[in-house]
């Protein structure tokens, strides 16, 4: 088949299409977004009617994909690492139900927090759920793992978790494609109670999952993605996970002087691991993320062998791995070819000039600072989070998707007034609607600003689930119609906007203000494409 130059994300997408995918289910989140976008624009997607619409959030994506698997077809679920927290309810239980059609869950982690609130490592979710996991070291492996992973999922009867990291997701390499497979026909489980997790059945299925753990370990021991590479210097053995193996090889282009256990599939392969331990004086673990393997090795080995890595300070406990940090860990001289010139200053991100969020914050901060000195503003995840920076300095919190509304409610319950929530249209339909229902049920004294730019702008302008329906949603949840107010955030409307904000703050109850103006980036793209 042809060889293509692909991003890691694109390699995953192409592999799924080549493997007979019937549907991708996702919510946009960097660094996972390009997987779904690639599938959406691929000609085969329309030709074969492959599902490719964005979901409201990661939980709905996970559940819909499990429904497709229930019907015997192959499904891909994509999200960034914090999306795993949203999907976890279904994800963890899907390990107990198992699958019928192959299902692969892609978790794109973001070490160094390039565009995220934390550095959590999704491998802990796979371990917690007791299912097999993949972690590719390069784009070709990412392709191969997905292409072959659907049949492995069907063979084991379990979903698979594949963990990516930002550098691999967003870098390119040549990828050799494999033959196109046909989609599965609709079929159902021979066990009519497989997906019914009543306690009596769930207990049986959980025992079955536990009994299969040795089978999963054997699969890892025989996996082409786990490789023991011997070498003469037994002073140290290296466990190199995922992209960590790439960084190691950059330092040893002629081959590493130490024995290396390359890890691309989990659970850990005990046979090769013990081989490394039995022949080496100490172990160095290279993993991009948290000390997932390092902790397991310390548990396996106790004080028998010294294990080095992030926990003992050999590598930093935060941030990404890179070839330079790996060089330092293995005792090589750091010969970095490139350095950042001293004159280069860090430039924090900022709202686009002409963005409607700017006008919203300009007016909101003027009213609050001049007239309500005791105010607190609870923000959310989106472009508008940049309201935390100068010149606005407008917000007091940003925690997780949807938290703005519920934190404002909690602060109001504590006696804070005014308690203002700022949330975007896509984040509102992702996880803000249930918080609004809590507010309505208690008639909380909160003012909620849904800053509507009619897209999911922060991740590149994907469709927003609530476009054209926000007022109806708010009224349907129970907000009084006269307190659902729409304004157009433009300078000529500043006085009107100020008056609306004052009126809704003074109203003792739940009020929603919707400043609506299309994102200037998506508007510009539309004009260019005319």
Image (cartoon, rainbow, N blue to C red):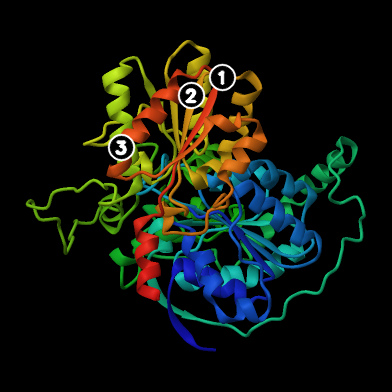
Residue 526, image x and y in percent? 40, 68
Q: Which residue is mark 3?
A: 494
Q: CA distance from mark 2 to mark 1?
A: 9 Å
Q: Which residue is mark 1?
A: 444
Dots 1, 3 in contact, CB < 8 A: no
- Asked if one can make out residue 314 in the rendered structure from this viewpoint, the answer is no
For the image, the number of numbered tags is: 3
- Under circle 2, the secondary element is helix
Q: Where's residue 243, x and y in %?
A: 42, 60
Front-lying residue, 295 or 388: 388
Is residue 408 rendered to the left or right of residue 326? right
Q: Residue 186, relative to residue 335: is it above or below?
A: below
Q: Residue furthest top?
A: 415
Element at label 1: loop
Which image quadrant: the N terminus? bottom right
Give residue 103's quadrant in the image: bottom right
Q: State how far apart marks 3 and 2 are (Cα).
A: 24 Å
Query: Tag 2 or tag 3, which sits nearer the N-term?
Result: 2
The crowding category of the residue bearing disc 2, from other C-alpha atoms within 10 Å (few below 14, some 14 to 19, many at least 20), is: many
Answer with left or right where residue 222 lies relative to residue 202: left
């Amino acid at each position: 088949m042809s060889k293509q130059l692909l991003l890691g994300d694109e390699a995953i997408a192409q592999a799924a299409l080549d493997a007979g995918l019937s549907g991708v289910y996702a919510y946009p989140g960097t660094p996972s977004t390009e997987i779904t976008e690639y599938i959406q624009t691929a000609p085969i997607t329309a030709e074969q009617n492959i599902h490719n619409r964005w979901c409201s959030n990661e939980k709905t994506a996970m559940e819909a994909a499990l429904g497709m698997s229930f019907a015997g077809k192959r499904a891909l679920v994509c999200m960034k690492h914090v999306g795993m927290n949203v999907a976890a309810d279904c994800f963890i239980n899907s390990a107990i139900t198992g699958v019928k059609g192959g299902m692969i869950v892609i978790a794109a982690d973001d070490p160094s927090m390039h565009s995220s609130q934390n550095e959590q490592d999704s491998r802990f979710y796979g371990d917690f759920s007791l299912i097999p996991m993949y972690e590719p070291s390069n784009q070709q492996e990412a392709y191969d793992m997905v292409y072959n992973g659907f049949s492995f999922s069907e063979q084991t009867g379990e979903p698979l978790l594949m963990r990516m990291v930002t550098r691999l997701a967003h870098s390119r390499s040549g990828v050799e494609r494999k033959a196109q497979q046909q989609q599965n026909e609709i079929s159902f489980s021979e066990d009519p109670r497989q997906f019914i997790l009543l306690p009596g059945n769930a207990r049986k299925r959980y025992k079955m999952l536990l009994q299969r753990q040795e089978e999963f370990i054997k699969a890892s021991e025989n996996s082409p993605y786990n490789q023991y590479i011997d070498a003469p210097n037994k002073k140290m053995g290296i466990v190199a996970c995922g992209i960590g193996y790439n960084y190691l090889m950059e330092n040893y282009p002629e081959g590493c002087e130490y024995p290396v256990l390359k890890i691309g599939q989990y659970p850990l392969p005990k046979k090769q691991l013990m081989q490394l331990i039995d022949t080496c004086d100490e172990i160095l673990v290279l993993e991009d993320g948290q000390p997932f393997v390092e902790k397991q090795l310390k548990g396996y080995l106790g004080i028998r062998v010294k294990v080095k890595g992030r926990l003992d300070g050999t590598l930093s406990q935060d941030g990404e791995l890179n070839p330079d940090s790996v060089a330092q860990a293995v005792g090589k001289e750091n010969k970095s070819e490139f350095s950042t010139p001293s004159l280069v200053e860090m430039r924090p991100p900022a709202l686009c000039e002409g963005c409607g969020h700017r006008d919203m914050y300009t007016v909101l901060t003027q009213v609050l600072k001049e007239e309500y000195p005791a105010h607190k503003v609870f923000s959310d995840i989106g472009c508008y989070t940049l309201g935390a920076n100068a010149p606005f300095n407008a917000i007091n919190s940003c925690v997780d998707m949807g938290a703005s509304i519920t934190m404002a409610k909690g602060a109001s319950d504590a006696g804070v007034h005014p308690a203002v929530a700022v949330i975007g249209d896509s984040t509102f339909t992702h996880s803000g609607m249930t918080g609004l229902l809590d507010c309505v049920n208690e008639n909380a004294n909160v003012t909620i600003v849904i800053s509507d730019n009619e897209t999911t702008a922060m991740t590149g302008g994907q469709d927003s689930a609530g476009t054209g329906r926000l007022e109806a949603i708010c009224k349907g949840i129970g907000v009084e119609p006269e307190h659902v107010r729409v304004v157009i955030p433009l300078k000529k409307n500043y006085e009107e906007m100020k008056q609306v904000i004052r009126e809704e703050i003074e109203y003792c109850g739940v009020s929603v203000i919707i400043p609506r103006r299309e994102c200037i980036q998506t508007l510009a793209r539309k004009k260019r494409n005319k």
